[in-house]
Amino acid sequence: MPQFGWTDQRILITGGAGFLGSHLIRALQARGVNLDQITVPRSAELDLRRWENCRAAVEGQDVVIHLAAVVGGIGINRERPGEFFYDNLMMGTQLMEAARQAGVQKFVAIGTICAYPKFTPVPFREEDLWNGYPEETNAPYGLAKKMQLVQAQAYRQQYGFNAIYLLPVNLYGPGDNFDPRSSHVIPALIKKCADAVENGDDHVVVWGDGSPTREFLYVEDCAEGIVLATERYNGPEPVNLGSGMEISIKDLVHLIADLTGFRGEIVWDTSKPNGQPRRCLDVSRAERYFGFRARTNFEEGLKRTIAWYLDRRRKGVL
């Protein structure tokens, strides 16, 4: 396949106005991509669950990077499993079909760590993706996103369509979602600790028992991984995007408490679910296939995220 270049490429980024999307656009600009080459459809104006909107979105595009998703933490996944399944499945399936019909040169599908089986051996290797059912609290979301891999491989086989599939681990960083109803674990914990410090509370309550482990990838690193994969990878195999680190929720809570200045007690609400027992990726395929390796130290990334959040909190914009 010829060398990929960004010059004059017309790029559609679904979800481009969101957390990861905003960082991805900055990473593309660093490659010399002009903003007039990038199209970012807004969900309020272009509902990608509708076929005609998918067709309109891909018209005239050379590259599609599909970031758009209905996402959230354990709580909202349990409240809205039907929506999480249907919305993510319909957006992804229809968008890729529309892109194929429109002659799009490359489709980059962004999957999720939630697609892995609940008891995947650690570190998670891409070969184990189909060896069991996902963790129940986020299975509808994980499976809906996983169908993009099936579709990409089927379309490559039948139509020669160049679709790739990436599996980012849990992201964090400046610009994250801090809404307690839908946020993931790091922003949720940062907000809890910041609230407790501001209010003078002597404890914070955290879901589960602290035993699960998680891996986190700084959002700027993830954006760079997506750009590298778009430039250099044209294969059928799914590829993990991660940092290769693993930390327990218990250690994470104490680290965030320390960095936010919270000195009170951590109370574990064991009536709430833990989620998947362990998450840590084998990241060797990404480095081998397109030269990606995460660069940001975890504690440094947390400090930047906390500083960003506290600054906006002081300014009253969150």
Image: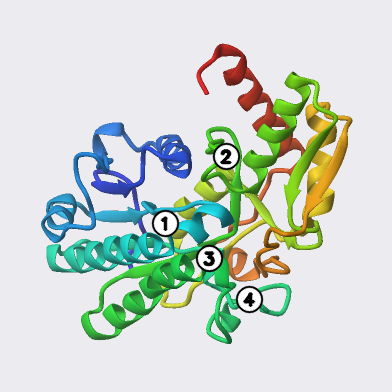
| Disc 3 secondary structure class | helix
Image: 220 above or below 313: below
CA distance for labels 1 and 3? 31 Å
Q: Nearer the viewer, mark 1 or mark 3?
A: 3
Q: Is residue 312 visible?
A: yes
User: For the residue marked with disc 1, what is the amino acid?
Assistant: Glu
| Rendering quarter of residue 246 | bottom right
Q: Earlier in the sequence, mark 4 or mark 3?
A: 4
**Residue lying farthest to the top in this orientation:** 315
Q: Nearer the viewer, mark 1 or mark 4?
A: 4
Say which residue label 2 marks. 180
Side of 127 relative to 238 (left or right): right
CA distance for labels 4 and 3? 10 Å
User: For the residue marked with disc 4, what is the amino acid?
Assistant: Lys
Q: Is residue 289 visible?
A: no
**Residue at (23, 54) in percent of width and height:** 48
CA distance for labels 1 and 4? 32 Å
- Tag 3: Cα neighbours inside 10 Å, few (<14), some, or many (≥20)? many
Q: Earlier in the sequence, mark 2 or mark 1?
A: 2
| Rendering quarter of residue 131 | bottom right
Say which residue label 3 marks. 138
| Rendering quarter of residue 1 | bottom left
Side of 68 relative to 294 (left or right): left
- Tag 2: Cα neighbours inside 10 Å, few (<14), some, or many (≥20)? some
Image: 312 above or below 292: above
Q: Earlier in the sequence, mark 1 or mark 3?
A: 3
Q: Nearer the viewer, residue 63 or 22?
A: 22
